[in-house]
Amino acid sequence: MRVMITGAGGFVGRHLQPLLKKQGWDMLATGHDTLDIMDSSAIRRVLKDYEPDAIIHLAAQSKVGASWEQPEHTAEVNILGSVKLYAEFVQQNPQGKFLYIGSSDVYGITAKKENKLTEDMPCAPQNPYSISKLAAEQMLLQMARKYKTKVICTRSFNHYGPGQNRGFVVSDFASQLAEIKLGYREPAIYVGNLTAKREFIYVDDVAEAYITLLAEKNADGIYNVAAGSPTGIEFILKSLLEIASIDVEIRVDEKKLRPVDIKAFCGSNVKLSCLGWKPKTSLQEGLRKTFDYWLRRCQGEHESGNCP
């Protein structure tokens, strides 16, 4: 299979590429520097040259904060960019597969009422980012019905692992503990609200889910990519403290505190598991790999003088 990836230089894209190669699939990785998804003519040229059997569409404006600051840009990239890419792909290969990577954030406040979110539950997004992801998903699904083409949409829950930047809970904790372990900062970790429970899926398992969806002939429509059970933020911190094997003071940073409207956010993975997928990486193993990554990264940052 010939697979084209947009947003290939992002967190998941960098993990997805070696797994696709391991499958023996031909792959074209594109990013901002090689393909502007807002440029239909550029998309057309790339598709004509490569002739992919499938597209994994990872490219997006994916920061919630930025979506409030730039709602128009977020809508253009996430909605219009996705539609442009899909429309050109359908013209080039009506029988091809289009895998749109969406977000569990589209469920919004529905999570306050439901213990485990399933794909048929109503969506009530609460920020410009999640609204744009839901709008793009629904546009693509409607176009697929009209043109009788194959579109698969994921609603991917929280994932973590090596290569994820600071600004996400696991990376924030792991990077601070790595710096403490290396002696680069005082033995104190700064945290926000620890009471919430969220899904945590190791990034390689997420990438395997996307490969499973592409490989399955009958896969179509919406799929949660979820662990199936939530984990407490406090438990994540305690687990990383055990892995780091250091004594630290836990300090609450007022800037990191956020109101917790949804105490537990959890998705059902029954639909995807019926295709043979399930997470393989235990939480402890995934956190260990993430902490080891941050040890290497923090050491490199300090040696090169590129500390944040």
Image: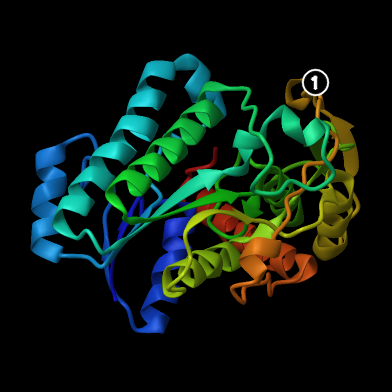
Residue 168 locus on image (x, y percent): 64, 42
Q: Which residue is drawn at 80% across and 48% down?
A: 116
For image coordinates 74% across by 21% down, the residue present is: 255
Number of marks present in the image shown: 1
Q: Could you tell me the amino acid type at mark 1?
A: Glu
Label 1 element class: helix
Left or right placement of residue 34 versus residue 155 in this view = left
Q: Residue 160: tell me if it is visible.
A: yes
Residue for badge 1: 254
Quadrant in which the C terminus appears: top right
Q: Quadrant for residue 275, please give it.
A: bottom right
> From the image, which quarter does the N terminus lie in?
bottom left
Callout 1 environment at 10 Å: few (<14), some (14 to 19), or many (20+)?
few
* Image point (55%, 31%), residue name: 130
What is the quadrant of residue 28 in the picture? bottom left
Vertically, is 19 above or below 150? Answer: below
Percent x, y of residue 114: 82, 39
Q: Give x and y (percent) for residue 202.
A: 65, 62
Decide if residue 12 is on the left or right side of residue 206: left
Q: In this view, does 226 lie above or below 275?
A: above
Name the image colouring. rainbow
Question: Is residue 97 found left or right of 173 in the rendered image?
Answer: left
Q: Where is residue 154 in the image (x, y as percent from the top left)?
A: 53, 52
Please tell me which residue lies in front, 148 or 275. Answer: 148
Residue 290 visible in rendering: no
